[in-house]
Image: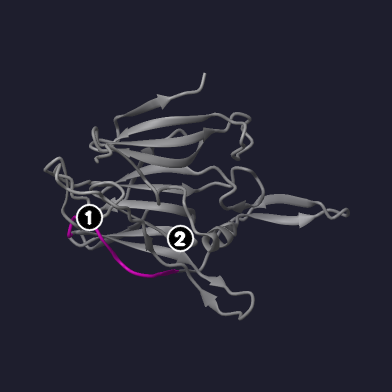
Amino acid sequence: MKRPLAILILGLLVWGCTDKKLERKGFQVSEISKDDKGKKIIGLPIDSLQLDSQPRNVLLTHYPDHRLTPLFKVNIDKDSGKPFTGSNRHHYTWREDNNDGNNWNNHLMPGFSVVRGYNMINVSHYNYQTQSQNEFFKKPVLIKNLYYPSYSKDSLHYEPVSRDYYMISVYDEDSNQDGFINVQDLRRFYWFDIDGNLSEALVPKIYSVMSSDYDAGNDLMYVSARLDENQNGQMEAEEAIHIFWIDLKDPRKRGLQYKSS
């Protein structure tokens, strides 16, 4: 039995119980104090946000000249006082067969590998041809998922599939103004060119990305996102959910699939 619409079981949303507890921490971006009644006061943004970070490993993209290194915030264990960092965790899924010419090598979508990690705060790109290094983001962010061109040879309908760009779902702003960047803020979705330069948002920034599905028949990605209707910078259950489509052959082609009336 074939399923042309493959659900990204471990896509933009799903984490284990332990991860959910950890990922809520994020990091502080504004001064926080209390008034004489003990009420929290969110002050000015921290001028120079410097977070200690460490790399964990190198991700091999489809292109030999381009390699990625995820950077993780150095955390301190409150019990032992020892530093620790997160690590990469790849998302995988199942496929029933490849009789229809689909060989995705257990990726969520053909042509993309997807990683996440606790307190991943940036990604470093290195070009072997130019011997140059650059980071995706100018300041620390909280990365949920990083999509990059898979090293393996994937195929879709008997045709080879290779992507020449990256996608990242990320918390990059203290949208709810609580002094922290964490999972309580709006989650954005961006795409970057093969050199790690930001192109544009794949979903308007007034939304918060929730989950995604893959349409193998059209090579489209469907992204469910909640509209921040009251503009308070956080997701709320009563706010509308819209669905966007993204053409993975060319992410410049995208639109609104579903909008509640």
Q: Residue furthest right?
A: 36
Q: Please report the residue visible at 48 percent of the width from the left and 62 percent of the height from the top.
A: 118
- 103 w.r.t. 25: above or below: above
Q: Please report the residue visible at 61 percent of the width from the left and 81 percent of the height from the top.
A: 80
Q: Which mark is residue 105?
A: 1
Instruction: Report which quarter residue 231 is drawn in.
Output: top right
Residue 62: say if magenta. yes
Question: Residue 23, position in %: x, y?
Answer: 54, 59
For marks 1 and 2, give the CA distance: 25 Å
Badge 2 element: strand
Residue 132: say if magenta. no
Q: Are marks 1 and 2 in contact (CB under 8 Å)?
A: no
Q: Please report the residue visible at 22 percent of the width from the left and 46 percent of the height from the top.
A: 163
Instruction: Give left or right: position of 222 versus 103.
Output: right
Q: Residues within 10 Å of mark 2 (few under 14, many from 20)?
A: many
Question: Residue 96, position in %: x, y?
Answer: 24, 49
Indicate the amino acid at tag 1. Answer: Asn
> Nearer the N terminus, badge 1 or badge 2?
1
Q: Please report the residue visible at 22 percent of the width from the left and 50 percent of the height from the top.
A: 104
Q: Residue furthest top?
A: 261
Q: Which mark is residue 120?
A: 2
Indicate the amino acid at tag 2. Answer: Met
Q: Magenta segment, which residues?
A: 54-64
Badge 1 element: loop
Question: Residue 257, position in %: x, y?
Answer: 39, 26
Instruction: Report which quarter residue 61 is drawn in.
Output: bottom left
Q: In this orientation, which residue lies closer to the viewer: 104 or 123?
A: 104
Q: In this orientation, which residue lies closer to the viewer: 122 or 157?
A: 157
Question: Residue 187, position in %: x, y?
Answer: 50, 44
- Count the marks: 2
